[in-house]
Image: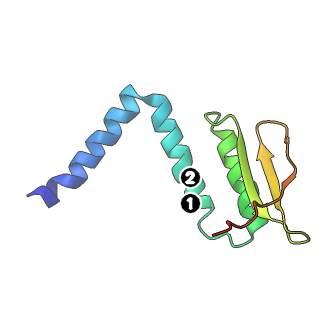
Amino acid sequence: MLILLEPLRAKVDERVVAIFFRERFDFLVSMRALQARTLNIIDVAQLASLLLDGLNETRRVTHVSVYLLAEDRPAFASSTAGAPSRCPSSTPAPPAPW
């Protein structure tokens, strides 16, 4: 019986959120669309760019940063959206002594 009512409960829950919590519903729809767009992307730089743009489009996220390991040096390169980048690259922490 529970298996039959689960899809109905999910639809009712989605409608309640759409009616009473419109901003949250719009954010969830945007995240689902972003998830669908990033599903088949293999290039890391393209994926980071798409994530930054997609999260910036929602207008719910104020600052977004993606740190990727730089190819030319042992540091992390920053891709930032929403605010000026304060740290274009960051060196990794030294390994723990133990």
* Residue corresponding to mark 2: 33
Q: Residue at x 51, y 52 (%)?
A: 32
Q: Amino acid at mark 1?
A: Ala
Residue 26 in the figure: left or right of residue 5: right
Residue 71 in the figure: left or right of residue 25: right
Q: Residue lying farthest top?
A: 20
Q: Secondary structure at mark 1?
A: helix
Residue 21 pos. (x, y %): 41, 29
Total number of numbered labels? Answer: 2
* Residue corresponding to mark 1: 36
- The colour scheme of the drawn protein is rainbow
Res 7 → quadrant: bottom left
Q: Amino acid at mark 2?
A: Ala
Q: Residue at x 68, y 34 (%)?
A: 62
Q: Secondary structure at mark 2?
A: helix
Res 95 → quadrant: bottom right
Q: Residue lying farthest front?
A: 98
